[in-house]
Each structure stands twice: as structure tokens, then as C-alpha cells.
Image (tube, rainbow, N blue to C red):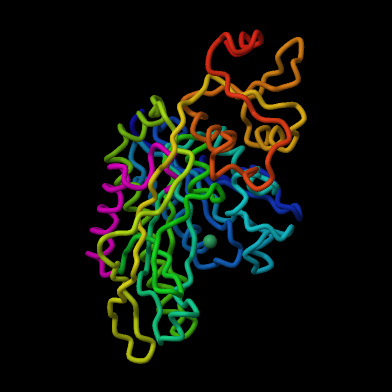
Amino acid sequence: MPNHTPSSINTRPEEIGLSVLGRPILVHYHGSPEAPLRLFFLCGQHGDERAIHRAAQLFSQSLHDSPELLGDLLQVAIITSANPDGLALRSRLNDQGVDLNRDHLHLRTPETQAIHRFVAQWRPHLTIDMHNFPSRRLHLLARGLRLAWDLCIDFPTNPAIPVRDGHPLFASLAQALELRLTEAGFRYGRYTMVEPNGSSRHGTPQLLDARNVLSLRYGSPVVLLEARNPSKRNAPHDHRHIRQATLLACHELLRWATNHAETLLTLQSHPPTPSRVPIRSRRRIAPQPLNVPVVSLSHGQTQLLPCNPHRPLVEGRRSVSLPLAYAVPNSETGVLDLLRRQGLSLTTPSPSPGFQLVPVTPATGPLLALLLEAKSNFSPYRRSPLRDPIRRITSFTDSQSIEALS
Ligand SMILES: [Zn+2]
């Protein structure tokens, strides 16, 4: 049946987990559960970013009121508050004092565990991680300036991620958003860190946040959407302005995803299979400085601030070919616990030779290489070397127990 059943049957929120203090973490669904393309909007990891939380609620409401925005291809899941304790306490952190968007590798909090369980089960084809960014950074304020962008996006930057910064899919999305937002009079840009020393760069390649870790773990594209934190001075007007920019961007994302449905569906059904995975990286300096639009706080005019050097690109170095499996010694309980929290399958060879086998698949290979290769500079163990080395199983003769893999 091509047309929608009334959306109300799908908009009842589902509880996917509880916060540290026992508050429910809710997902709101929109669209037919039969629709082939699944988009996941993740919002509110930082409890103090109330403006984006409100915008996500309005976006959810807009899909409830106008289900035709989804067409026949899309279904949408929205978490408007991934950190309900932080939201209640106006805190960036959760009640354990953890920044949830730095916990996507270790998964030490019930909130990030709930997000990962949901993604593992619902398998979105595209995830949009929504935040507010502060435009008033101290070193800019000292010069009487603030960042001018209303809305920015960023992409995964770790070189091991197949669908990362520079992928044609992301170039197309950035172009669509830029066109739509600038045409409507908003300031749109690529999310950029302007450092006190005048240099600039995009997101880190480290394995910390939803952007890099969810795309590595589940292979599907993740986009960071950053709306400027509205100013406190002319608050009502600026709040409305940023909310409109965010809603427009979310609706444009739906339109763009519909137009790129085939590519998004194929990326999940046939993930790219890298033959080699870069496990180290370096930033490359662009030949030209980046001109960042800033607003003068004294006269309100927009001007361009040249940032030099600009390091937009993260380049992969020292690639490894993927083994069939990694053998992790039983003594390395920290490594094994992390792999289990990430939901990666471990097999215990029989009779036990003292290690667990971690099979490598096209989907899990890049993450496993970054975590388990001794030379990886993204390994969480690079500063505290393991007592027993992790072995690469590259052929069926490496171990009698390798049969456990097949
Ligand atoms: Zn945030």
C-alpha cells in the first residue's frame, strides 16, 4: 500500500533504556515501519544544549503533523533527549560526570549503551547527530568577534572509515544543505574549530564521538549537525532564527535522503570492503588559509577572519591488511570487555588455547584494526601496552582452532 496509515500509530515513543538516575530514553518513530530507508536523528547527548533539543522536538512534531514529508521511502526515528538527567540538571554531562559524546568507544554509560543497542537493532541507513556549538569562544570575544554560522555540518574524519569526509555522498549532502540554507538567508558552513593560535581544523579523527564510532562500528554514514547556540541578548529573535535554520536543514535532509535512497540502501547491503585499513593519520595543511565568517560584536557586521594554517584533511598512514581474525589473550580482560560492550562476537576455541578469537568481517574490520593493531595510534591501549600481545590470524594454518570461525 503506497500511502501512509495515520502516523499516530507510529509516533508513540518507545523506551530504549534508562539514564543513570532512571529517566527513560525515548525514541519517537515516524513513517511506515515498512518504508525501506531508515534515518536516525540523535539529539541531546549534551544536556545543556537546550535549543537543539527544542528544535528536535519541533522537527518530530512537524513529521507527526505532516507525515507526507516522509514520502513512501522514509521512516525516521528521533531521540530528542539522549541525556535526560543532563537535560533536567542543565548539565553537559550525564549523572556519572561523563560526556556522552566522548564515550562511544568504551560505552561506560547506560545512555551510550542504549544508543548503541538501538542502532544495532534498528540499523539506520543514515544517522544525524545534533548539537549546539558556542559561537562565543573566549579568544574570539577578546577580539570583539563571534562565529557567524547559524548551522554547520561535519563528517566522520577517521581515515579508516569508508564513508568519510571527501566521500561523494557527503559532498552532495553538503552542497544540498548549503544551497537550501543560504537561499533562505541562513549562514551555513562546514563545522570548524578555530584555535586560539589562529589555526583551524574540522572534527578530530579520534575514536570518541558518535560521528566516528557509530560509522566505524555499523558501517552506515553519520553526519554531525551543529546549530549555533542562540545569543542570550536578543534571545527570542535569535532562538527563532536558529530553530528555523535547524528545521529547514532537517527537512532538506529528508529530501536529500529520498533522492539518494539507492546509494544509502546499497551502502548498508553491500558495505565497502577495504583491502587495507589505515591505522595512523596526520593532518595536512591546506595551501590557502580558511576565511571564517565572524560577526563583530560592536557593530554587528560580518567579516572574514583568515585562519592560518588550516588543516582540513586527515590523511591515513601505515595501512594494514585485514587478517581473518584477531586472537586476544584471555589475560587482557580490559580489551575483551571493550569488545563485548561493543557487541562484537568473540569465540572461545575448544580446547581453550588461552585466547578468544575475534572474527573480522567487512563491516567490523576497520574498527577491529584500529583497536587491536599494535601500531594503531587510535588504540585505547597505546599508552598502556598490553602484557600479552594480540595475534593476527591470517591463514587457516595459524591455529588449529580457526575452524571455530567458519
Ligand atoms: Zn553537543
Looking at the rendered structure, the number of numbered marks drawn on it comes to 0
Front residue of this view, candidates 112 and 39: 112
Determine the residue positioned at 38% across, 57% down.
153
Q: Residue furthest bottom?
A: 298
Image point (46%, 78%), residue name = 136
- For image coordinates 47% across by 43% down, the residue present is 280
Q: Quadrant of the C terminus?
A: top right
Q: Which residues are magenta?
A: 156-185
Quadrant of res 349: top right
76 displayed left or right of 23? left
Which residue is depicted at the point 56% across and 50% down?
Answer: 208
Of 174 and 249, which appears nearest the observer? 174
Residue 31 visible within the image: no
Task: Pinpoint residue 216: horizontal percent, then vertical percent.
Answer: 49, 38
| Magenta stretch contains residue 107 | no
- Indicate whether residue 166 is drawn in magenta: yes
Is residue 351 positioned above or below 118 on the image?
Answer: above
Please state the horizontal and vertical placement of residue 49, each as a whole percent of the image: 55, 66
Q: Is residue 248 left or right of residue 204?
A: left
Q: Position of residue 109 (x, y in %)?
A: 69, 49
Instruction: Give the side of residue 252 with respect to residue 48, left or right.
Output: left
Q: Quadrant of the N terminus?
A: top left
Horizontal relation, residue 236 to residue 111: left or right: left
Residue nearest the viewer, comparing 111 with 100? 100
Is residue 394 visible in the rendered image? The answer is yes
Image location of residue 203, percent across then percent down: 44, 56
